[in-house]
Amino acid sequence: MHAELPPPGADAAAHSARLAALIRDEISASGGVIPFSRFMERCLYAPGLGYYSAGSTKFGAAGDFVTAPELGPLFATCIAQATAPLLQQLGGEAEFLEIGGGSGALAEVVLKRLLALDALPARYAILEPSADLRERQREHLGRSLVPPLFDRVEWIDAPPEAPWQGVLFANEVIDALPTPRFSLRAGEVYEEYVALDGNGQFKRADRPADPLLAAAVRHLERTLGNEFADGYRSELLPQLPYWIQAVMGGMQAGAMLFVDYGYPRREYYLPQRSDGTLRAFYRHHVHNNAYLWPGLQDLTASVDFTALAEAGTQAGFELVGYTHQASFLLGNGLDERLQEAAQHADAARQQQLHNEARRLILPTEMGERFQVMGFSRGVDFSAPFLAADLSWRL
């Protein structure tokens, strides 16, 4: 499979080698192993070297993958359409918090649409851990927004601790949280670690799981109604409830909206999915070698949406809906937004918009692979999910 991947250039390869050396040093200093979740964290977020911390292009045709906001304006316009009534309910002090801002494309379209709907938030906050992406977002929004809109954008280093109300939105964020991996051996729970072989290359090394991970796996087995077979390997995020409570900060009222690829729990942990969902994205190729070219490829795992529902409700929110991306976008005006955008466009632009819509909603593209989940506290946020709520599948 690796022969099919385009090789990195000399500078990129040297960059990856520096990060690999850093990880090797950490493995050696940690007694010869580190948890896979720590390896993933270093690959993605090591300062100046990790995939999301360094300067290469991540999104779009020139990057490694395409997210829905990068395809064009339709996705973000529908997000604005869904959240505008809630922002209007909350009044002039409402805020919009985006977790991980990508290229800034979503913020641009959402702000312009909310202005048109008379639903502008008092602040559009972007919680972006990558200094490189933060600067790219700042440059993009500085070019594309008029000053009164741009002045509402603020980059924050941590979730707001002071009381606030509004919308928390995250697109393709949870899949990039560094995840523990577990396996079963003779009925016992093991955690996947990363070690070094005799040539200094990364290799898998399983160790008995700590009490938190072991208890989380046993919770899965109880909710699924059966034990995992020996050799079964997958991922889970026992820290997800803590992450939700951390990113919401001092949120008192409003809605949380998450879009990501994944499954309800019973589909996530099917017997045939016996090696989990972890995969790497490199220049629009998907493969399963997490150890290849650290820092040059994205590492992700699908989201257990049942676990997300549990985490959100444990944080004091009501689960208001769960559905496929296609149903969510169509239920929040995708057809109307498509017609509106295409009305004054030339033939080439109209075709581009129709292609964008198809990628967003076709089952073979993003339509069913991506899921949307919403939570609310102190407000009514049920309308965006009225078209087709699939919460019964959780």
Image: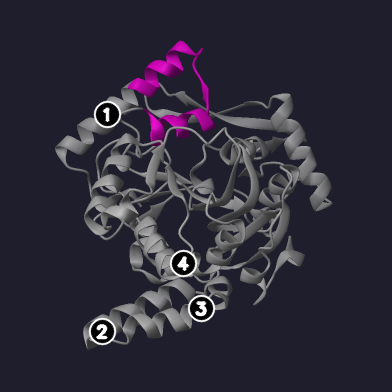
In this rendering, the label closer to the viewer, 1 or 4? 4
Task: Name the amino acid, label 1.
Answer: Ala
Task: Name the amino acid, label 4.
Answer: Asp
Q: Quadrant of residue 380?
A: bottom right
In this rendering, the label closer to the viewer, 4 or 3? 4
Element type at mark 3: loop
Q: Earlier in the sequence, mark 1 or mark 3?
A: 1
Q: Which residues are magenta?
A: 22-46
Q: Earlier in the sequence, mark 2 or mark 1?
A: 1
Residue 54, x across and y down, in percent: 28, 36
Single out the residue that lies furthest toward the front. Answer: 92
Mark 1, residues whose alpha carbon is within 10 Å: few (<14), some, or many (≥20)?
some
Residue at left offset 34%, top offset 66%: 71
Q: Is residue 343 visible?
A: yes
Magenta-colored stretch includes residue 375: no
* Mark 1 and mark 3: Cα distance apart in space: 47 Å
**Which residue in the protein does label 1 denote?**
17
Mark 4, residues whose alpha carbon is within 10 Å: few (<14), some, or many (≥20)?
few
For residue 118, which numbered disc appears in the image? 4
